[in-house]
Structures are given as structure tokens and as C-alpha cells.
Image (tube, rainbow, N blue to C red):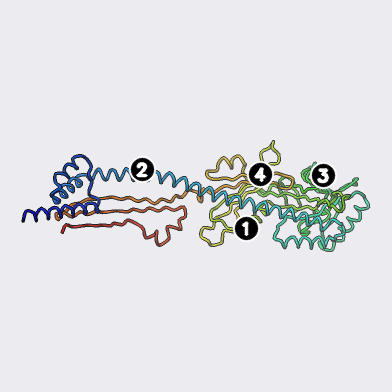
Amino acid sequence: MKEEENGATGAFDAAHDEVEDLENGALVLEDQGDREDYTETKGNGRNLSHRRRKKLANRPGLIAALIILLGTAAFGIILGFGITAAKQDQENYFESLARDLLHDFEEALGSFVMAGLWLHQACRSRSITHQEFREAFEYLQSTGLEFRNIAFAMNVTSDAERAALENQTQAYIKETQPGASYPGFRTVQRDHPNGPTIVPQSNQSHYFPVHYVEPIEQFHPVIDVDFISTPGRRKALEEAIETWQPAMTVRLKLTGNNVITTDPDTYSVILVHPGIPLPSRPEVVPRDVSVLAIDINNVMTRAHRFLVEKSVSVYLFDSTDPNETPPFLGGATLPNDKGGTGNANELKFLPEIELSSLVGRAKYYTLTKNISAASRKWTFVAVASEDDYRPEVTFVILVSLQSLEPNNRNTMRRTLIFCVLIVGSNHDLCRLPLFSSLGIYTFQASSEDK
């Protein structure tokens, strides 16, 4: 009877150990020898559990090697996908930002073209006075548009008309600019010994003087100067008259009296607007033109409407002539506003550079797009900042290390170590309490035979 009780007790202990081993993940039959050992010691649970633990305890190196191998493979896969996704994230952000900037620049340029149309409509009847033209200039200023100057050039075809206009200007200059001289209609003499110089104009069959100009304080020396006496402006005017479409000059360096200067890296263009054909008056043909002298930097400033989290540089080139290297028009960097201070409103204007070297030197992302600028074709180039667009990758790495350590009381201890490393494409995530508190954690579960 006692032997039966012992046998029953042994069977119960063996079943208890098997259940415990299954729960703890220790029942591993790795080869035929294990299966035979299991069969031989089936009646004695304690011997089975002890032998199995002893075998597993002698194989920690194999388990560790498998864990490291699997972890390395998983890490490699995550790394590859992570880097690819991070680069794509940065590229998508840059392209979206660059296209928004392009859209804003085209809108800003369109605002200047619309101003030219409006100015032409205000002056087309020729009944406007110099004072009324000044008021028109003040209206345009109220829109936030900035001009180097605005003007209205008139097609004069008789000496009598010339005399009347000269008398009108004489009275206005005397009233508003005391002490200033007014010699009448003038022209630019290109072959003057001192270079291009404004000189009195002799009698001609027709004239195209800039009869109205503002601000008069800085630009009264160019009032009634023949607009077509310089080749670039003459070409733009002829294009506007022939096509009845706004036209643009090549880049210019302008001073207060519109004579070419050598001011580095600052360029202007002159927009010429002939008005529009009127369906109700098909007999009307283009005659006079409104004239806007525009600094490229002012167009860029007008386009800079919002703050950006990542810095980007914008360049403009005139690509109208396919047979020449596109001339530089202007460039500016939009600083980032990562801190959210709102102080990144000021553009940093950039020195002149060639289009080929710009695209060739870019280490990160660029967007190049041709746009219409009245009668000319400009190239818009956006370049990502090297510091702000380096790929930032997010990885979550879990490493599980198991240690089976039998002690004197046949206690099995399993230690799981989880290491979490977070390097985010959005580093703000790392500042959240959940993530900032993550580190290395140890969880221990032990069981003892009763």
C-alpha cells in the first residue's frame, strides 16, 4: 500500500512538473535522446525535471547566439525600411514646401502684372494730371506692393503735342520740386564719351516719353525721357504693342535716375503693360503703356507669406534665351522657425551664382520649375538646407535576453531585458513623458518547488 502511495505521489509530482515546465517554457525535446530520457524517467518527475534543467543550463551560449542572430537580422530589416522611409518623409516635406513657395511667388509676380493693368486703365484717357497720377501711386502703395518707380509712357506723334506736354510738366516741376531744372523732352545717348547719358532730344517724327513718374522726389530727372532710347526697353515696348500682352525687360541694374549701375547682386526688371483689347471697341489699338520698375528682391519679399520649420533657399534665373547661360535674377534664404518664436520673417538675400553650379552642388533636395514672367521665361529653383533636411530615422529596437539560472533550491529564474531606442523623425515625440521615461527595464519571474 505504501509503495502504491509513493507511486501515486511520484506521478502527481511528475505531472505537476510537466505543467510547470510547459508554463515556464522549459519543456524542450531537442533530439531523440531527450525523447528517450523522457520515456525512461517518465515515472519519476523530479529526476526528469532536474536532468532537463541541467541540460538547458549547459546551453546558454547557443540560446544567446540564436537571440543575437535573430535580433541582428530584425535590426537590419528595420534599419533598411527606416532609412528609406525617413528619406521619403524629408523629400515629401521639401517638395510640398517648395511647391507652396513657387505658388506664392507666381501669385506675387501676378500682383505686379495686375498693378500694371490697373495703372494703364487709370491713365489711358490721357486726361489725368500729374497730381492724380501721384494719387494713383499712393493707391498702389496701399496694397503692400513695393516698386522702384511707376510711370506712364505716351506715344507722341506731333511737335504740337510735344510742346503741350512739356508745358504741363514744366508747371508741375516748378510747383513740387522748387529749384529743379526741366529741359524738356530728352533721350539716352548710348555713344556719349562718358557712357550712357541723358541729353535733350532733337525734333523727331514721334516720341515715347515717360510723361508721368512717381515717386517724383527721386525720379524727376527721368520725367519725359524717351522710353525707347535704350534697346532693352524698346524691345519690351514693341513686344507689348505687337502682342497686346504685358512684356518684361531683361535684368537691369537701376539707380535713382534709371541709368545702369554696378550694384552687386541686386537686379531689377521693367514691366510694360499695353492694356487689354476691348470687345466693345474693336477699333482701339495699343498706344500708350504703363511702366513698373520692380526689384526682384521685392517680389521675393512679397511672396514670403509664412514661416517655415525647415530652411529653404530660392533662386531665380532668366531662361528666355536658350543660347545663353541663364542670367541670375535674385536669390534668398527663408530661415527656419523651429523654436516657434515668429522671428524668422526676414529674408537673407544671396550672392549671384550660376544655375549649373547651383544644381550641381546641391547635396539634398531641389525643385526646378520654369515659370512665365510676362513675355519672358524664368527658372525658379528651390534648394533644401543641408542642416535641416538630414534624414532622421525612427527605430524601436527590442532585445530579449533569457538567462536560466538554477539555484540550490531548484529555482528557475528568467530575466527579460527590453531596450528601447527612439530617434525620431519628429524629435518632439521623444519629449513626451511616455517616451522620455523609457530606458532599460528588467522583469524577473521565479517559481519554486513546494
Circle 2 sits on which residue? 73
* Secondary structure of residue under mark 2: helix
Q: Residue furthest front?
A: 1
Q: Position of residue 429 (x, y in %)?
A: 44, 58
Q: Earlier in the sequence, mark 4 or mark 2?
A: 2
Q: Position of residue 15 (x, y in %)?
A: 18, 53
Mark 1 → mark 4, Cα distance in angstroms: 21 Å
Mark 3 → mark 4, Cα distance in angstroms: 24 Å
Q: Nearer the viewer, residue 10 or 313?
A: 10
Label 3 crowd bin: few (<14), some (14–19), many (20+), radius 10 Å = few
Circle 3 sits on which residue? 242
Q: Position of residue 167 (x, y in %)?
A: 90, 57
Label 4 crowd bin: few (<14), some (14–19), many (20+), radius 10 Å = some
Which residue is found at the position 16% from the left and 57% from the top?
449
In this rendering, the label closer to the viewer, 4 or 2: 2
Query: Residue flagged by tag 4: what amino acid is it?
Result: Asn
* Secondary structure of residue under mark 3: helix
